[in-house]
Amino acid sequence: MTTISPPSVIDGNRRADLIRVSARLFRDRGYDGTTIRDIADAVGMRSGSPFYHFKSKQEILAAVMEEGLLSCLPAVERIVGGELPPRQKFQALVRAHLETVLAEGHDFIPVLLYDWRALSPGLREGIVALRDRYDRVWQVAITELKQAGLIKSDSKVARLLLMGAINFSVQWYQPGKGCTLDELAEEAVGMFLL
């Protein structure tokens, strides 16, 4: 398994800037449509400077995906581990996921959704492990819904279909136009639960 170069304390902010800007560019242009020069220009660096922080463009892509997953995992793990009843827990989970994929500046997970196949096998391994951890959290919630009689199936396919529907909102949702994230979460819960 290939690992991502860790940041030092001194260069952590520049590295964070590179990850944030790369996420936006990858989301807007796609991984293949974004060059290292584009990334460097967007953060005010020389074209070779990103390689001080990352070994390759692939490593930047993996760091973007890792950032997205690591930033949302604690919240969803707290929700699922909490004491809310299953329906409220599910609504909080849906709302947290919508925030992760749709909120302003949250470009990391949309990049994961559309560009994860661009990762080399070595880098993909670490991202898949984090994604699987996220999926397990959702599966726990889906199983609780099934046990409470609020959903017909708690199969992996049911979870994947549900997540796919929510994730596709990145294609059509426009902040400030139509419903809010809270309203969207409420609508989704109403559609998915019995």
Image (cartoon, rainbow, N blue to C red):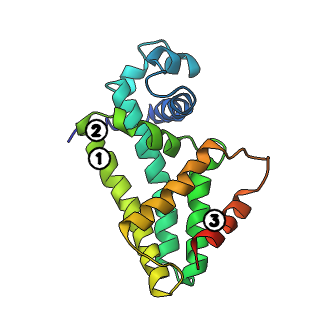
Q: Residues within 10 Å of mark 3 (few under 14, many from 20)?
A: some
The first of marks 3 and 2 along the sequence is: 2
Secondary structure under tag 3 reads helix
Residue sitting at 40 percent across and 45 percent down? Answer: 66
Residue type at mark 3: give it: Ala
Residue 143, quarter of picture:
bottom left
Q: Are marks 1 and 2 in contact (CB under 8 Å)?
A: yes
Say which mark, if any, is on residue 186: none
Q: Quadrant of the C terminus?
A: bottom right
Q: Are marks 3 and 2 in contact (CB under 8 Å)?
A: no
Residue type at mark 1: give it: Gly
Label 1 vs label 3, nearer the camera: 3
Q: Which residue bears the numbered disc 2?
A: 123
Q: Position of residue 191 (x, y in %)?
A: 63, 69
162 or 182, which is in the foreground? 162
136 above or below 103? below
102 relative to 75 in the view: left or right: right
Q: Which residue bears the numbered disc 3?
A: 188
Q: Position of residue 181 (x, y in %)?
A: 70, 57
